[in-house]
Amino acid sequence: MNISKLKIVLKYLTSGMGGVVDYLLDLLNNALAGLDPAKKDRIVAVLNLSKRVLATLRSLQWLCPTKWQIAYGETVGAVETTTDALADLVLTPEELKKVADAFQKAVQEWKSGDDETCVE
């Protein structure tokens, strides 16, 4: 569950910022899919990955086009929600629902049209 800097560069060069965000969210989604609430070591591993994804998204925000900033903000918020839910190393059904809702909203924003109110 490592984030490859080389893959980030390649994704950016071939697919732009959308490819980078897709790559990071895929990593986190795959980790979340294999999460077992009964195994604390697994929760710690996913928490660490979530923190790294969040830090990477924040550090690359300046590369995101203005017309995508709202969706990007929703994505960062979804990863923050995930990180917060995992921080106590206990995953409740309410926290799982909160994480799922945040990710659903972020994906919906990301896949919707560009924000035409923003001017580059």
Image: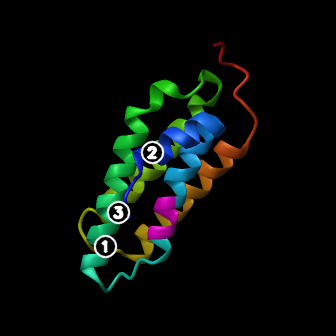
Q: Which residues are magenta?
A: 27-31
Could you tell me residue 80's position as x and y percent? 39, 49
Kindly identify the residue that appears in the image at 41 percent across and 54 percent down.
81
Decide which of tag 1 and tag 2 comes sooner along the chain: 2
Q: Is residue 11 left or right of residue 56?
A: right
Helix, strand, or loop for circle 2?
helix
Nearer the observer, 89 or 97: 89
Can you identify the residue that label 3 sits on? Answer: 85
- Amino acid type at mark 2: Leu
On the image, numbered disc 2 is attached to which residue?
A: 6
* Comparing labels 1 and 2, the label whose residue is closer to the camera: 2
Would residue 27 be seen by someone viewing this image from the given angle? yes
Amino acid bearing label 1: Ile
Which residue is depicted at the point 69% across and 27% down?
Answer: 115
Q: Nearer the viewer, mark 3 or mark 2?
A: 2
Please identify the quarter of the rendering in which residue 40 is found.
Answer: bottom left
Q: Give percent across and percent down for residue 15.
A: 65, 39
Q: Which residue is mark 1?
A: 43
